[in-house]
Structure formats: structure tokens, C-alpha cells
């Protein structure tokens, strides 16, 4: 065993990692959710995508300037250590390892399984499911649960046993998932302008019951899931060739590609169907209107592949989570989780920890959100709240840059970090307004997990 990663990823792989992790299922199904939350108001929906993208962009710019200076084993943990200190870096890494990475990864494993079954049943409506489709069989049935676990194991195996193959898979799935997005953006906009459908959707909101009290805040909060994951690309900085140059380029260029893809796709979808159709049937109806039933069904296959690509990228970060702490001789059993296999050049034990963390959080997600086996207590959105907590972790890092980065110019020291602080505070405020009492239950779980982190913080002191 050895304890260092080799440089095996290039710039193009890094860009595909940023784009591939972020663009998953969110771009396809969040369009419907955002229209519902805005009351079918298309301009407000577009504005929410732009605001969510700008929040991501200013945070990316802030971290990109740090990526030019710091390179160790895990980007955001490195930046937390360099700007604030080892203790803050440890708790940031612990949170990402136990809640943030698993939350995203388990959600994408489930969505990959769901859309695989949606595709299968759209091609073969007679496909037997234990729970009928009308009763949510593609989302909560045993077939979906088994397929979710299989996808967990598959993504774990690829990343743990062949990191280079995982990188190639990321590139391939990123290219594939951009095909339907670009098609809809181009054809949908042209068709919508030619038929007047876009003008009609902009002028006439749909009829929606139960509109959010704060439509813009609620819809921006929903974009957080669709835009999240880019920070995971920094977890490969120790494996990226010329990381101080290539990582900032990958972050910024990948971010701009994502924002353009999301906004243009959302407008393109509006060109292919009315607001009411999109709310009632989702983006699939727009594909069917423009390309026919066959391609409308094939869209579900593209979504499944897209989710699998995102899952691969998320597992890449998840499998390195506990290693980033062990490499600093902190956390539980650093001598075990800090090992790197000579043959695969991968922290296999760390990957196993990441897999188990995903499964544990998925069990909670299933019983609380999918099966709905209990009500009221300890119910929270396990896919959004851990994501939005990251913005709270970012704020001290950005403040430290403002105070201490005396060697940087005004843009990098004051303007970008200040905008990033404002963006992070906005997301936190939007979260509280959108999720309400759910935040309390989540914070109880968060406090418990962080208390466990405190117990495991320094293994040397525990042994004395």
C-alpha cells in the first residue's frame, strides 16, 4: 500500500466531471417543479434558473482563485484548512463525507433506477411490477429498490477498482446527456418562435393549485439540487495534471456551460408545450410534441444515462471523502482509510465507507420520503438540505479571503468573496423560507452527526 494518488486526469476530463456531476436528472424534472412553484409563470421560472446559476458562478469564481494557490488531497477541505485552520477543515470534510456526498449520491442512484424503470415501462407497458405504475411502482416498488442498490454497487466498483475507467465513463456520459438538452434547446426555441408558443407561454401563466407563498425563493431553492455538485470536482485536485492551472479553468468553463444549457433548455421546453402541459405531464410532453412518441420515450433512457453519469461523478467524490481526513491523520481509523491500493491507485477502504454511508442515508430517505412510514417528526428533504448546508460552510472561508488575502487584487480579495458571501446567505435564507420546520429536524440530525465527528476527530488523543 502507498498513500498518494498519481496524476491521471487531464483538463477535458475535469471539465466533463464538473458538467457531468451537475447536469443529472435535475434539468429534466426540475422544469416541471419550478413551473408549479411559480404558478406557471415562465419569466419567473427563467429568472430562478438565472439566479441559481449566478449563485453557483460567484462561488465557483471564489474557489477557482483558491484552486490556483492550494493543492493537497481534497479541494474544499484544502481551502478550509488554508484559510481558517485544521479544525474547521476537519469538520467541513466530516460533514461532506457523512451527509453531503451521501445525500447527493443516494438521490442519483435512486433517480437512475427510477428513470430506468420509466424507460422500460414506456417501451413495454405490460412489464410486470409488484406495485402498479399508477401507484408509484417505478419510484417505490421493490424493483426500484433493488436496482438502486445495484447502481450503488456498480458505481462503487467502477470507482474503487478502476479510477481511469471511471474518468472515461464520466466523459462518455457527459457527451451523451448533452444531446437531448442541445436538441430541445435549439429545436424547441425555433419551433416556439415560429408557432407563437413561446410568446403565449410568456404571456399566459398556467393554472396551479397550492402556489408557494414565495414563488421566486421556492423556485430558486429548487434549482439548488440541479446546480449542485460542482464542488465535488475539487476532490480530484491531487489526481489532476497541472491542477493549479486546470482546475480553475474546469470549474469556470464547466459552470458557464451548465448555466447556458439549463436556461436554453428551459426555454426550449416552453417552445414545445404549453405551461399547463408541462405542469401536468413534465418535459416528456415537449419531446413528444416535437419529435414524436418514440423519441419522447427515448428521453427517459437519456435521463437514466444522464443520472448514471452524475452518479459516477458523485461516487468519485464520495469514495474519497474519508480519505481526505485520514490523509491528515484525523477521523476514525486513519491508518485504514488512508491506505491506497498499489494496483488500482485508489483508496478502496475509503470507498467502502462512502458506499455504506450512501446506503444508510438511502434507508432513511426511503422510509421518510418514499414509503412515508412516519409523519411529522424527523421528516426533512434529505436531497436539498444537506446541499444547502454547504453554503453555510462556505461563508467563513469567503470571509477569511476578504480579511487575509492581502496578496490578491481587489477583485479576488474583496469583490468576488463578498458576492459569494451574499449569494450563500441568500441560499440559506431561501432554504429557511422554503422548508420551514423541516430545517429544525434536519439541524438535530446535523448536530448529532457533527458530535460524532468530534468524538472521532483526533485518534491519537483517543489512544492516550
Image (tube, rainbow, N blue to C red):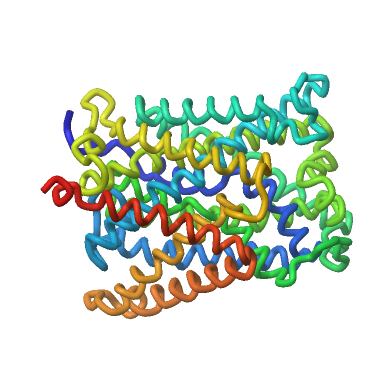
Image x and y of residue 412, in percent? 34, 73
Q: Residue at x 23, y 39 (%)?
A: 333
Instruction: Tell whether 4 sits left or right of 441.
Output: left
Image x and y of residue 66, in percent? 30, 63
Instruction: Tell whether 310 sits left or right of 35.
Output: left
Q: How many badges with numbers are in the image?
A: 0
Q: Nearer the viewer, residue 179 or 282?
A: 282
Instruction: Tell whether 225 sits left or right of 43.
Output: left
Residue 166 in sight in this render: yes
Residue 241 in sight in this render: no
Q: Nearer the viewer, residue 407 or 440?
A: 440
The N terminus sits in image quarter: top left
Which residue is most to the left?
A: 464
Image x and y of residue 59, in percent? 44, 65
Quadrant housing residue 380: bottom right
Image x and y of residue 187, in percent? 75, 47
Q: Residue at x 68, y 46 (%)?
A: 28
Q: Residue at x 30, y 50 (%)?
A: 74
Quadrant housing residue 84: bottom left
Instruction: Tell whether 141 sits left or right of 365.
Output: right
Q: Nearer the viewer, residue 380 or 276?
A: 380
Q: Indicate whether 300 appears above or below 462.
A: above
Q: Residue at x 55, y 53 (%)?
A: 258
Q: Indicate whether 158 appears above or below 108.
A: above
Amino acid at each position: 500500500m502507498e498513500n498518494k494518488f498519481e496524476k491521471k486526469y487531464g483538463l477535458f476530463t475535469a471539465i466533463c466531471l464538473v458538467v457531468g456531476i451537475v447536469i443529472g436528472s435535475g434539468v429534466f424534472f426540475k422544469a416541471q417543479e419550478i413551473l408549479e412553484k411559480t404558478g406557471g409563470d415562465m419569466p419567473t421560472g427563467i429568472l430562478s434558473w438565472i439566479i441559481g446559476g449566478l449563485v453557483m458562478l460567484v462561488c465557483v469564481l471564489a474557489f477557482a482563485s483558491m484552486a490556483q494557490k492550494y493543492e493537497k488531497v481534497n479541494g474544499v477541505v484544502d481551502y478550509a484548512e488554508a484559510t481558517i485552520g485544521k479544525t474547521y477543515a476537519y469538520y467541513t470534510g466530516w460533514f461532506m463525507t457523512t451527509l453531503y456526498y451521501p445525500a447527493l449520491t443516494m438521490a442519483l442512484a435512486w433517480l437512475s433506477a427510477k428513470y430506468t424503470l420509466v424507460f422500460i415501462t414506456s417501451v413495454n407497458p405490460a412489464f410486470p411490477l409488484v406495485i402498479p405504475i399508477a401507484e408509484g411502482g417505478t419510484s417505490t416498488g421493490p424493483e426500484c429498490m433493488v436496482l438502486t442498490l445495484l447502481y450503488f454497487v456498480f458505481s462503487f466498483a467502477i470507482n474503487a477498482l478502476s479510477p481511469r475507467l471511471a474518468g472515461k465513463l464520466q466523459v462518455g456520459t457527459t457527451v451523451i446527456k448533452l444531446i437531448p438538452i442541445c436538441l430541445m434547446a435549439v429545436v424547441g426555441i425555433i419551433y416556439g418562435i415560429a408557432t407563437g408558443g413561446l410568446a403565449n407561454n410568456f404571456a399566459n401563466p398556467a393554472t396551479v393549485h397550492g402556489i408557494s407563498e414565495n414563488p421566486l425563493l421556492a423556485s430558486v431553492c429548487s434549482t439548488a439540487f440541479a446546480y449542485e455538485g460542482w464542488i465535488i470536482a475539487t476532490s480530484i485536485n491531487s489526481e489532476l495534471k497541472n491542477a493549479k492551472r486546470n482546475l480553475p479553468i474546469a470549474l469556470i468553463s464547466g459552470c458557464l456551460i451548465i448555466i447556458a444549457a439549463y436556461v436554453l433548455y428551459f426555454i426550449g421546453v416552453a417552445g414545445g408545450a404549453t405551461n399547463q402541459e408541462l405542469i401536468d405531464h413534465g418535459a416528456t410532453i415537449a419531446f413528444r410534441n416535437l419529435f414524436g412518441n418514440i423519441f419522447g420515450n427515448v428521453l427517459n433512457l437519456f435521463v437514466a444515462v444522464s443520472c448514471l453519469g452524475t452518479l459516477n461523478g458523485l461516487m468519485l467524490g464520495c469514495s474519497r471523502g474519508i480519505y481526505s481526513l485520514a490523509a491528515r491523520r484525523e477521523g476514525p481509523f486513519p491508518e485504514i482509510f488512508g491506505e491506497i491500493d498499489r494496483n488500482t491507485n485508489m483508496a478502496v477502504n475509503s470507498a467502502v465507507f462512502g458506499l455504506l454511508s450512501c446506503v444508510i442515508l438511502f434507508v432513511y430517505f426511503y422510509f421518510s420520503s418514499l414509503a412515508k412510514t412516519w409523519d411529522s417528526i424527523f421528516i426533512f428533504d434529505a436531497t436539498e438540505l444537506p446541499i444547502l448546508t454547504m453554503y453555510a460552510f462556505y461563508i467563513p472561508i469567503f470571509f477569511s479571503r476578504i480579511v487575509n488575502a492581502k496578496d490578491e487584487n481587489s477583485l479576488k480579495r474583496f469583490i468576488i468573496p463578498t458576492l459569494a458571501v451574499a449569494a450563500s446567505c441568500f441560499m440559506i435564507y431561501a432554504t429557511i423560507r422554503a422548508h420551514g420546520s423541516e430545517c429544525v429536524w434536519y439541524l438535530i440530525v446535523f448536530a448529532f452527526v457533527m458530535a460524532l465527528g468530534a468524538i472521532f476527530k483526533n485518534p491519537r488523543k483517543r489512544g492516550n
